[in-house]
Image (cartoon, rainbow, N blue to C red):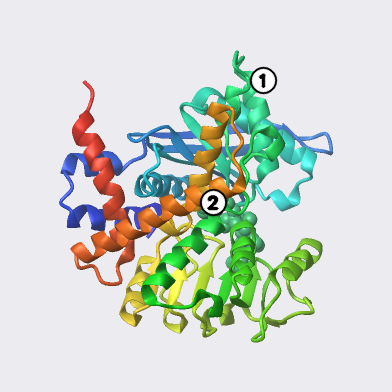
């Protein structure tokens, strides 16, 4: 099953449960726009290389398209379509006035210098042209991109679209640096949101999160921040991994020290505070919380049965296959689904966009307070609808029910032009 088919299967189960009008199901089944661009960029050796980039705009019934840009060699149209549709439902679930989009470039950023990445990014932003804009489609960082990537995109967009109101145009992207119009709290937002959802789960379970033992797959932006925030609450990081390897210490790993080690050595192997373990052993560690924070389809029918935790907090998009979902449900393992768990990223991106429009700079406490409120309301709505539909451990369908109900209202009230 392709990733886009998986994404469709997830929301269509909820659509059937709620008997969504067939015409709305038909509209949501395909993205509104699929943009593919091929563009040249100058390499440091004086040669030009052609790159392929995508922007998929899935749906904008609730507001301007919104979604990250991924730089990875395996980026393709199927993956970008899946990620774009997840953005649509994520924004609807947490009640943001935004639609869903995603973009990417087929590139391995690790093989390029900063100057090459800057030229690739500028040419990509130029190729997208007016397909993005602060009132139309607003990119953000994802795997392989960061605040610097967003600043290059913003600067290129402002300079190539002859904007009169250059400062208002800063809102063409979010996840920027603070000096260029970014928001406090955006760097940790995805992880902070995931931790807030874990707090909601813990409160309902009467579980003391400060005693939690947890495991993180993917020690990048979302994963390392999640580890730091949970350890700050007193929880214990048992194991962590990145694309190069996995490490384990049953006495606990210091996330700051591990991050410093990885920043210098790339591979966690050799980190003095933990022992190396085979990657697949990561899934077998008995813990309270498992945080997949790397890529799609990491938990599947081959490893789901090994998992021995109370709750899985999906910081990554699409980390669990449908077959694994069923196995986890049978085992009674609670999943906080991706469109809820990792929505902190787009929520604070939305705050950044609002601050840019109003020319404001909010304090971190305000950002965190508003983030906690939005994501907790969405968590409670998911629980409530799950109970109403008697969904048991099927929290994923519950989250889609909340999202689809909101979108259904918008479609029924607006209708289809003409
Ligand atoms: P990132 O590039 O900062 O981190 C990804 C990490 O995963 C890296 O450490 C990488 O080495 C690791 N990784 C890759 N393959 C792996 C493997 N097979 N095993 C273990 N680790 C592996 O990216 P990120 O921004 O932290 O995004 C991670 C996930 O979170 C993605 O699914 C992304 O779509 C999702 N997400 C990110 C944001 C955001 O704001 N950054 C928001 C919502 C969702």
Please determine whether, in this image, residue 198 is positioned above or below residue 377.
below
Please determine whether, in this image, residue 350 is positioned above or below residue 9.
above
Question: Badge 1, how many Cα within 10 Å: few under 14, some, many 20+?
Answer: few
Residue pictured at 56% horizontal, 59% vertical? 191
Name the residue carrying label 2. 368
Is mark 2 in CB contact (under 8 Å) with mark 1?
no
Depth-wise, is mark 2 or mark 1 nearer the camera?
2
Residue pictured at 18% horizontal, 53% vertical? 18
Q: Quadrant of the C terminus?
A: top left
**Mark drawn on residue 84:** none
Residue pictured at 37% horizontal, 59% vertical? 379
Left or right: where 119 falls relative to 240: right
Instruction: Report the Cα–Cα distance between label 2 and label 1.
Output: 33 Å
Question: Badge 2, how many Cα within 10 Å: few under 14, some, many 20+?
Answer: some
Residue 85 horizontal/vertical position (percent) = 39, 46
**Mark drawn on residue 159:** 1
């Amino acid at each position: 099953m392709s990733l886009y088919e998986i994404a469709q299967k997830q929301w269509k189960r909820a659509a059937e449960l709620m008997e969504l009008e067939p015409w709305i199901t038909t509209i949501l089944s395909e993205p509104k726009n699929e943009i593919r661009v091929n563009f040249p960029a100058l390499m440091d050796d004086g040669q030009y290389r052609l790159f392929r980039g995508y922007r998929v705009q899935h749906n904008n019934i609730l507001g301007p398209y919104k979604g990250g840009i991924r730089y990875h060699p395996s980026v393709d149209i199927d993956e970008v379509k899946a990620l774009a549709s997840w953005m649509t439902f994520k924004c609807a679930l947490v009640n943001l006035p935004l639609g869903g989009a995603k973009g990417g470039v087929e590139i391995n950023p690790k093989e390029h210098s900063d100057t090459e990445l800057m030229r690739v990014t500028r040419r990509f932003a130029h190729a997208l042209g007016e397909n993005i804009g602060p009132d139309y489609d607003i990119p953000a960082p994802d795997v392989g991109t960061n605040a610097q990537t967003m600043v290059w995109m913003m600067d290129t967009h402002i300079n190539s679209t002859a904007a009169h109101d250059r400062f208002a145009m800063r809102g063409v992207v979010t996840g920027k640096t603070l000096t260029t119009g970014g928001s406090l709290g955006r760097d940790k937002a995805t992880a902070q949101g995931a931790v807030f959802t874990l707090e909601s789960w813990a409160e309902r379970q009467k579980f003391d999160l400060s005693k939690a033992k947890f495991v993180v797959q993917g020690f990048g932006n979302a994963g390392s921040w999640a580890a730091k925030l949970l350890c700050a609450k007193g929880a214990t990081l048992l194991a962590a991994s990145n694309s190069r390897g996995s490490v384990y210490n049953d006495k606990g790993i210091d996330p700051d020290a591990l991050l410093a080690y990885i920043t210098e050595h790339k591979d966690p192997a050799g980190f003095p505070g933990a022992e190396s373990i085979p990657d697949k052993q990561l899934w077998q560690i008995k813990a309270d919380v498992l945080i997949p924070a790397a890529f799609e389809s990491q938990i599947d029918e081959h490893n789901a049965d090994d998992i021995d935790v109370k709750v899985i907090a999906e910081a990554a998009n699409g980390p669990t296959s449908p077959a694994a979902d069923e196995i986890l449900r049978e085992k009674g393992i609670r999943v906080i689904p991706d469109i809820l768990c990792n929505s902190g990223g787009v929520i604070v991106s939305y705050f950044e966009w609002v601050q840019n429009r109003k020319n404001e700079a909010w304090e971190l406490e305000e950002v965190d307070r508003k983030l906690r409120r939005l994501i907790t309301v969405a968590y409670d709505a998911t629980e409530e609808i799950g109970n109403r539909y008697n969904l048991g451990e099927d929290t994923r369908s519950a989250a889609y029910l909340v999202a689809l109900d909101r979108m259904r209202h918008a479609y029924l009230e607006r209708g289809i032009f003409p």
